[in-house]
Amino acid sequence: MAERPMFDDEYLPDWLVAGGITCAGHGAGRSDVPELPPWERPQPKTGVSLPDFAPPPEDAPPPWVSGVEAPELPPFEAPAEAVPPIFQALPPDSEAESIVLDDLILPWEAEAPAAEGAPLDDPFSDLDWMRETPAAAPPSPDQPATPRFQTSWLSEAILPEAMQGGSESSAPPTFQTSWLSEAMLPEAMQGGSETPASPTFQTSWLSEATPSAPQSDESLTDLFATSSETASEPSAAASDDWLRDFGAASDFDFPATDPDLTAASSPTQIKPPSFDWQSEGAAASEVAADSADWLRDFSVGDELEELEGSETTVAPDWLEASGVTAERAVEAAEPQLDWLTESAPAESPAFDQGVEELPDWLAESAPLVESTPAQAADDLPDWLQADESPAEAATEAEDIPDWLRTGYLEARPEPTAAPPEPEPQAEADLPDWMREFAPEPKSSGGLMGSGDDLAWLDQIDFEKPVAPQVADIPKPSRGAPRRPEPEFGLDDPVLDAVLAQTSDLELSEPSLPSIDLDEEFDFETLPELPDAPAASEPPVPVRMPAAPVPPSKATGEAVVVAGDLPEWVAEMRPDSKPTLRIGDQEITLEERPLSALPEPILALRERLKQLPEPPAAPESPDSPLSGIAEVLQPPAFEAVPSPLTPSGALATAAQLAGVQTLRKIVAAQEEILKRRESLEIGAPAHLKPRARLKFDRLLLIVFLIAAVVLPFFTDLANLVPPPRFAALDSASQTRFTAINRAVSDIPRGASALVAFEYTPNAAAEMDDLARALLRDLIRREVKPILISTNPAASLHAYNLLYRLSRDSAEMATLGRNTPLAPRRDYIVLGYLPGGVSGVRALANALYDDSFQQQVIFGNDLEGASSGITPDQLRILRAQPIFLLAQSQEDVQTWVEQYRPPPNAPPDSRLRMVIATAAAATATAQTYAAAEPERIIGTLSGLRDALLYREVRAQYPSAEAQRKAEQHWQSVGFAAFAATLAILIGAALSMIQYLAQRRRSQ
Amino acid sequence: MTPETLEQVGVIAGAVLTLAIFSYALGDNFLYRLAIHIFIGAAAGFVLLATLESVLIPWLSATVLITPFELPRLVIGLLPFLFGLLLVYKGTARLSRLGDFGVMIVLGVGTALALLGAVNGTLLPLIGDAARAFRPENALNGLIGLIGTLSVLVFFTYVGLRRLSGEVTQFLPVRFVGLIGQGFIAITLGATYGLLILSALTVLSGVLSDRLFILIGR
């Protein structure tokens, strides 16, 4: 049982298949019938022509299509296989073909233009032109006497004989039947068509809302008035509740003269609340005992019976409100249309079983197709009015459920004028529950609407032909004109053949046992249905889902809205795919038929089936696939030692010792890190160890500061005598003499380059040397041109000259009465970028490149023009450069790069005097010893500054000389103290080391 | 405010900042960090201004904005900006290769100049000076210099023999000469360190005499 597919047409009885019920989804997927586009699908509806039917002449198109000319396109040829066999035998041009009623193509729409530009693959393309044609309704008001027969897809093909006879009445009746149509009409109703008065049947639930003759309303009133009078049990109070849910309770006015109406008569069967108004008919069904159950619910049969003998013309209010009066029926019928799509599958069994044997579940859905008068559109809810066109006839298309539009809309006339633009808010105004049922143009569900929301409808193939199909329906997108509808009659042999087939499908009433509507429908029972209808077997009860009720406009209250599809339906959705759930994630897998698998996979599958199922191993919660169902468990592997693998690593003793050392280092490092973490992280912020004041450091600092300061206050600290030129050795005197001669050789008024390569942090040491050199140059009226590769050094040079020019004592020493002025007495050039490259560029600029000369010597530090002329640059080549360097790197850079370029004259030589800090003394002296021709001499630190000032007689006063000597004493005494501190520290460290070594031994 | 007043304010501010720097002797503190931040910020700002006023603007004036217009100067003037733009790409992972081109220019030129200067300005002069050291009047100095140079070179010899135990050992003469070179290195580094201390003490003395004594009125 479980191996059998759930939805397979093979298991459906023939009478269900003949009735149009097939199993969509799986069953449809296995069908050999190719998927046809909507316009090529066989028409499910058949029509029947009445003898008095007189279609409009072909040469006189209706006025609504007069202005529109269909494009001249070749007629569409439907494939032969789309034609049912019973019609394939007929010659295509025979007259009998015209009998195959394409009731969906009315005569006046034969030349209706097809929708242009509609996509070929759009299943709703043929519907759009109908929705957008508000004024495309057949001109029934203009032709009241013209009989119109708008039958639905079941229609007259299965009409009982009595009903067929009704068409022989002298007066042309107007039949607007729906999918249940006349086939289900009881005899009383069938006989109604034979009434001399030829009433126009607007059986709202049986027909479509078509503008009818004025006398229709009256006839309908007569029809339903009787049933309302015969109703005895339903009470108005009880009905008010469900009518209030229906949304039109305010419009319903039960007569107060119905004292017998009780709540017990309220509908008990599962059916949409929108049909509860027909519980009146259900009450009346007790009177009309011979009526079918479904008619008993709707009271139609009763009403029809009463119609024959009753002359009552007063209809009850509830009938008027329910649309019989064509004024307010929309309120009652419009909400039904939506959930009607869900109840649509029930129609075919009803069709097959005949009118009287219709089950109750079908009776519920039967009235759903009740037509609604178009003039009641103003009472429609907003979500429906959004799609309403100005013309009333357009509401018909909107009132029809999607599954019904397949056949119905094609029976609509073509638009006569330019279709109005669809209102965009129509979709937005739909309620949520309605949106789920709204058809989607791109949906794969075809004409049935959304494939997701109405997926359960896919189980039933409405499109399977049960009636002769018409092959000459052109594709709307192609705009092919349709053939004019030929005249046909009931005596056509094709219709007889169809009726002959359907006559065997009638079931007797006793064969239908009572059906428990509360019983859950089990699709498992569907394949067990007999192939042929058996009178003793009960039909499959179908429990229809609750119909969602749109909000009522009349009451303004939110009505009860049904939820989604029932769970049991949703679970059995044929289009549902296997879903793998991983936590809250779902992965839908593509299900493929087993036959589609390749042979190796099939073979492997068979092998796996034969394998014994391993015992379920406990799932590890740490597994990455933990919690995932049906996961293939990996086989357990057991590590087996390989004989090729050496049992142990080979290492020498030294390598092992190195490994042990590394381990110790790593362990010590980890220990240190852990200790730090425990101290820093574990302790609170206020308890974290702060930087402790180290007394040894503080003591040393105090000691050194005292040593530095003390010589300024007392002569007791003068341990080192100040340097004197006379006390120098011959080499030092020669060095100083060379520097003095180099400075003296600079012609007055000339310029001299000064490389200022020390920053303010070395000012205390280098400023004395810089001042000594600058004083000497300025005093000899030599314009110093200061340049630096360090911006901070350039700034310090600028500041130094500024302070020098502001010192009156210095100016007095220089023999000047006015302060020094930049660019006149000295030039501080801009920062020389590039480091090594900059020094090289400077050396090159001194010789042959005017462009580099302009770039390097063009502007001073303030950005102003330096005023250096090329003649001054030529003089600069012959003058030594005075390098004031702080570090060894500066000395090295200038010594290495400040050289004449290769294209310089052969005897070119760029000389220099190096004045450095004490730290760069060794390097400077090394270079000076290596290149004595180029490096004139070196000056180092404070000592040489004092010597230079002494040699060049730069002390303006004895006090200045005393201060300079105090500075020297300070440095000397501090150096002595530092040396002492270093020695004491070294001694203490040695003692500590020896003590530790002794303790370790 | 007169320039003299500004100078006095500058001197006092310099003295306070000097004390703040000296406070680091007691440990890392707020005053020290404040003074450091001030110096760094001031230096950065001045570098920006100095670069803009004394480098970029003069460069553009001499090349790109020169009148009359000269195409060669324009091209030359844009080259540094092109290289600078390439260096900016070093900040992105995708376009860092373009930045490599700029780095290649800078490092290539700098390395070439440094190598050339080192050979011509350092190695060759020092080799010549070492050769000239062997003169009768300073034979001892020359001998010490020769021994010191050779021993230091031997000390930086990394050639050895790996024994069966895995230990790498050097020959005894190499180790002995290397030990002598290590002594020369220690003496050189000690002298350099002493000179650095002397420079620091000179700076300290100069700062105290120039700044603090102004504060105490001397």
Image (tube, coloured by chain):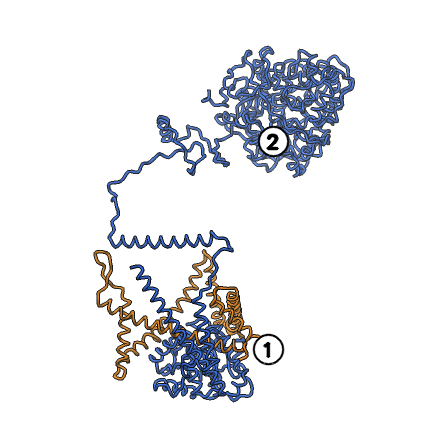
Figure colour of chain B? orange
Identify the chain of the residue marked 1, using the numbered disc in the image: B
Question: What residue would you read off at disc 2?
Answer: A437
User: Element under label 1?
Assistant: helix
**Residue found 44% across the figure and 58% down from its top:** B96
Q: Position of residue B14 (x, y in %)?
A: 53, 73
**Same subunit, tags 1 and 2:** no
Would residue A700 be visible to someone looking at this image? yes
Q: What residue occupies the far top of the structure in this picture?
A: A510
Residue B165, how many percent across, how many down?
Answer: 22, 56
| Residue A541 quadrant | top right
Q: Residue at x 50, y 17 (%)?
A: A528
Chain in blue in the render: A
Disc 2 secondary structure class? helix
Question: Label 2 crowding class (10 Å Cα cut-off): few <14, some 14-19, many 20+?
Answer: many
Crowding around mark 1 (Cα neighbors within 10 Å: few <14, some 14 to 19, many 20+) is few
Q: Are marks 1 and 2 in contact (CB under 8 Å)?
A: no
Q: Which residue is at the front of the view, A8 or A71? A: A8
Report whether residue A851 is seen: no
Q: Image check: A1001 left or right of A342?
A: left
Q: Disc 1 to disc 2, how far (Cα)?
A: 90 Å
Mark sitting on residue B5: 1
Residue drawn at point x = 29 percent, y = 71 percent: B183
State the mark number for residue A728: none
Q: Is residue A106 above or below residue A687?
A: above
